Image (cartoon, rainbow, N blue to C red):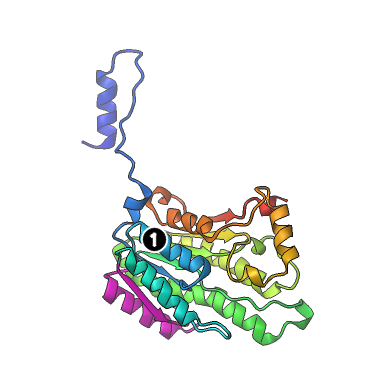
Amino acid sequence: MTPTAWTLAAREVAPAGAAVVEERPEARRLAETVQGRVAVVTGGATGLGRATCMEFAQRGTAVAFNYLDLPGRDVAAQALLTETAIRALGVPVYCARCDVRRRQDVEQFVVAVRERLGGVHFLVNNAGVTHDGALWRLTPEAWQEVLDTNVTGAFNCIQGVAQPMRAQRFGKIVNVASHQAFRPGFGISNYAASKAALIGLTKSAAVDLGPSNINVNAVAPGFMKTELLTTLPREVLERAEHESVLGRVAEPEDIARVIVFLCSDAARHITGQVIVVDGGLTLA
């Protein structure tokens, strides 16, 4: 019997004037709607990427993440720690070095994920870089690297998973933008431009991929307590706390939980949207 049929039947047998309550299947918990799936998280070794990997893993989602060695940071060692923590939760995990700016690297990474973990259902474009500087001093190299990583890198990854997601007629993509796409500070013209472009890519990809039952959304975090935040002057952090209507800076888990929600069935009718998770910073 179709939903329409049982609704009409209920009305036929209900006493005159009695309220008709339509029964609905019991809502599944968020964890159950992502359990057994496979999530790809770019830049998953540290910070928000690591928090997102852990949120997925805690809900029974297999996790694949990439990393890239950076000057002055032993990212490979941090990636190993993240991989070990995920494995300890009893879910499959795959970790590999992959430069999202290189389409061939991305294609090889996606192929390896599908072979090792059995598919790809969620993509979180978290990998990003910053090279701050006053606009009149910004070098062409600093401009290009930020745009290549934050925008082209996300495009490469979306294109890399589009074919398998379209074939299975299911997929969730979440791009990590920034509140600074709407409210840039001084000296971040390249970063602000890249995150604004990422929002445009989010909306366009949602239009292109929607007919294949693929949701594409973005989150726009405010300041977070990550390694990057520790490099900023103390007064920047204090100003962020003061300007947030909640009076605090986000933990990475605050944003990671929204990302996982957007990949759940609870968000199945949300696409092409930007969820600002900044504690009300952009309201000030």
Residue at 47% from the left image edge and 76% from the top image edge: 78
- The single residue placed furthest to the top in the displayed view is 16
- Give the structural element (helix, strand or loop) at label 1: helix
Count of all numbered marks drawn on residues in the image: 1
Relative to 284, say whether 86 is above or below: below
Residue 97 lies in magenta, yes or no?
A: yes
Q: Position of residue 31 (x, y in %)?
A: 35, 52
Establish if 98 lies above or below 11: below
Task: State the residue position of label 1.
Answer: 56
Give amino acid for label 1: Phe
Q: Position of residue 54 (x, y in %)?
A: 41, 63
Mark 1 closeness class: few <14, some 14–19, many ≥20 residues within 10 Å: many
Q: Residue 127, can we see it?
A: yes
Q: Nearer the viewer, residue 45 or 4?
A: 45
In this orientation, does residue 166 appear? no
Place residue 90 in its image quadrant.
bottom left
Residue 37 location in percent, x, y?
31, 61
Left or right: 171 as drawn, with respect to 222: left
221 left or right of 234 in image: left
Residue range corresponding to the magenta coloring: 92-120
Farthest residue in the right direction? 136
Image quadrant assignment for residue 198: bottom right
